[in-house]
Image (cartoon, rainbow, N blue to C red):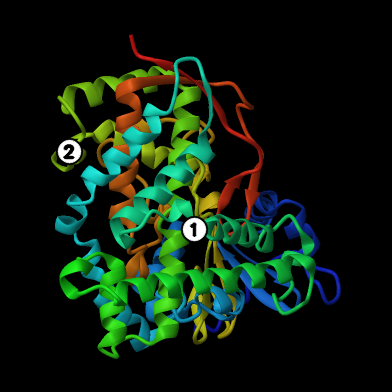
Amino acid sequence: MSANASYPPGPDGVPVVGNTFALSRDIFEFYERLREEYGPIASYRVFGTDACMVAHPDAVRRVLLDDHDAFVKGDVLTRNLEDAMGEGLFVTEGEQWRQQRTRVQPSFYRERLNTYVPEMRATARETVEEWRDGAVVEANEAMTATTMKVLGRTLFGVDVTDEPVVADASAAILARFDTSRFWSFLPDTVPTPTNRRYRRELDRLREFVDELAARRRAQSPAERGDDLLSTLVGFVEASDLSREEFRDNMITFLFAGHETTALGLTYALLCLARNPDEQTRLREEVDSVCEGAVEADHLPELERTGRAIDEALRLYPPVYMFFREAARDVELGGYEIPAGTTLVLPQWVVHRDAAWWDDPATFRPERFAGDADRPEYAHFPFGGGPRHCIGMRFARMEMKTVLATILRDYRFELVSAAEPELVASSNLKPGEPIELRIHERG
């Protein structure tokens, strides 16, 4: 630690609650003002917790990649997610995390993922076949149903959209972590109505996951197949995974496996509806690359489509911030970060920083064409380093497949607000419907 290093600057808070009121009023504005007034590394407090915003790409890289062993997921994350997924891949640390990651990783190898593309395409086809020329579609509702079906059919071998418990739990989680509500910063042990509902729906979800496991265990090895659910059940039977680890990983994949992808697709549709010329260019690419149905071999060639998705994820990152905690005293960006400090890495702020992005509020997919003169971690929608999102390839393949399937049959225009209200909860969610009027291609 440099003798000249000091703790990062930041705003004074009020006794006990610190900066919680300002944070809950508008979390995006709070972090943007923090960067503008104090720089990309700045401190604040939330209910007695010392926190630092880390919003410089080089510092983000150090936390996630270069010095990742100096940082852990931390108390804030584990305390909030302990009940839902505390023994799962997203929260665990050290050897437990490494063993889980190694066991699950083969389900996400590219060769395996390629076999999922026909189901992704077929599910997207089901969605568009329900649409009618001139109808108005609520984008997030449609994409959530689509990605939930894809998840269930590819990774779990069941159609989880038939189970209301999953949607009910998702709604309870949204309410529990809605940062615009002051009480969302309270521990879930505080018996607020929101917390009671959260715990009740989590209990129901655990029962549902246990039922899925029991049904799969009742099948013979030949009947089971080799999807993720069967793989996890097999690890439990071999005593390589505890029942708690199985349950928490299932809950992790249920939500991380569909919700973030649905939101990525929703925001891609929003951006393309606002930019009809780019929508036309993507449609021309799909027509050129995909002579018939979208196949796995086509996906790498859908380069313009990939850039549009990247740009949508820049503007509206479904995971809008990451948490870490300093496991030891570290120096970051010239500042002293004591052990135990909570670090917040806000994609929202970094992705919209004019230091790295020209005209950052504008949708310009061509930013991602060729080698750009910007730091690697100026764009990190899926995280980075050893703990990057294990489902990144799955999500990107699914988004390309679904978007290309929609573009083959329809063009669409926005009929709701051009810039919808956003809710910063467990993910970055639309606070109001995103409505598209769809038109069949002539």
Which label lies toward us, 1 or 2?
2
Nearer to me, 22 or 118: 118
Q: Which residue is mark 2?
A: 295
Q: What's the mark number on residue 428?
A: none
| Residue 154 in the image: above or below residue 365 | below
* Residue that protrudes farthest toward the right in the picture: 15
Identify the residue at image location x=31%, y=47%: 396
Q: Residues within 10 Å of mark 2 (few under 14, many from 20)?
A: some
Secondary-structure class at tag 1: loop
User: Is residue 223 rendered to the left or right of residue 16?
Assistant: left
Residue 120, relative to residue 104: is it above or below?
A: above
> The residue tagged with tag 2: helix, strand or loop?
loop
Name the one closer to the observer, 225 or 339.
225
Which of the 4 quarters of the picture holds residue 405?
top left
**Image position of 135 with respect to 157: above or below:** above
Q: Residues within 10 Å of mark 1 (few under 14, many from 20)?
A: many
Q: CA distance from mark 1 to mark 2?
A: 38 Å
Q: Which residue is mark 1?
A: 56
N-terminal of the pair, mark 1 or mark 2, is 1
Residue appearing at x 37%, y 76% in the figure: 214
Give the percent coordinates (x, y) of residue 149: 39, 49
Report whether residue 384 is seen: yes
Badge 1 amino acid: His
Question: How far across and down, in percent of the image, does residue 72 sit?
Answer: 47, 80
Q: Is residue 433 left or right of residue 120?
A: right
Amino acid tagged 2: Glu
**Left or right of 231 on screen, residue 151:** right
Residue 74 position by quadrant: bottom right
Instruction: Give coordinates of residue 193: x percent, y percent.
Output: 78, 67
**Quarter holding the C terminus?**
top left
Residue 76 on image: x %, y %: 60, 76
What residue occupies the far bottom of the structure in this picture? 239
